[in-house]
Image (cartoon, rainbow, N blue to C red):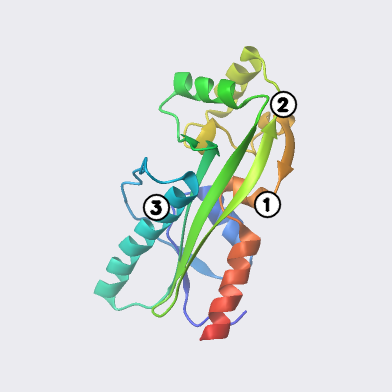
Amino acid sequence: MNLPYPIILASQSPRRRELLALTLLPFETMSVNTPETLNPTLSPEENVLAIAHEKADAVATILAHTKRQAIVLTADTMVAQGRHIFGKPSGFDEAFSMLQHLQGKTHQVHTGFTLRTPTINHSEYVTTHVTLNAMSSEAIAHYLHQQQPYDKAGSYGIQDPLMACHISSINGCYYNVVGLPLSRVWLALQAIIAQQ
């Protein structure tokens, strides 16, 4: 794939870096601090898109000052059941409560991403449905003590040891649940190249 500009992944997530590396495309990372505030009037899907846009805007401002051109990739992932959003927990108690609510049920994982060049602004979201087995309080506590997933939406990482034992089914993109829907990002990159 011949890219018209270098890729900048605007993310602090090590998981997103690992996922984008699977494309074998060269990229660099940039950290941007944005509020990532949820808008209660928006759906989870609209919220992930809004936050991805917000991150892309922040990077665009930085690049404008340096006169650099790039393909900027930003993303945001949320766990939800309907309109109820499960964000990153503040600690053990909140994480425990989230997993108690999610266990034995199906929930949605939404990732919104933006790919932005000097002339193109592409955004979309991808949804994956995940069903967790019923988990005892002891199983939840054991997972939380072992993995401490307090930096993860919904208080779990699908790729984590122990959590893999509790995933009953996945309907949709696995990589989306980890944090970046690679196949959709790849297709969007191809479309961007075709338009240059």
Residue 78 position within the rendered picture, expressed as x and y whole percent measured from the top left:
50, 43
Left or right of residue 183: residue 14: left
Residue 130 in view: yes
Q: Residue at x 36, y 46 (%)?
A: 36
Marks 2 and 1, how far apart in space? 19 Å
The residue wearing badge 3 is 51
Left or right of residue 27: residue 161: right
Q: Residue at x 35, y 44 (%)?
A: 39
Marks 2 and 3, how far apart in space? 30 Å
Relative to 36, say whether 132 is above or below: above
Say which mark, if any, is on residue 173: 1
Residue 175 position within the rendered picture, expressed as x and y whole percent measured from the top left:
64, 51
- Specify which label sits upstream in the sequence, 2 or 1: 2
* Amino acid type, label 1: Cys
Marks 3 and 1, how far apart in space? 21 Å
The residue wearing badge 2 is 133
Q: Quadrant of residue 164?
A: top right
Left or right of residue 73: residue 184: right
Task: Name the residue furthest left.
Answer: 65
Q: Could you say whether the residue bearing mark 1 is in a helix, strand or loop? A: loop
* Amino acid type, label 2: Asn
Q: Could you say whether the residue bearing mark 3 is in a helix, strand or loop? A: helix
* Amino acid type, label 3: Ile
Q: Residue at x 34, y 77 (%)?
A: 68
Relative to 27, say whether 47 is above or below: above
Q: Residue at x 43, y 48 (%)?
A: 47
Relative to 120, say whether 28 is above or below: above
- Specify which label sits upstream in the sequence, 3 or 1: 3
Residue 152 in view: no
CB within 8 Å, label 3 to label 1: no
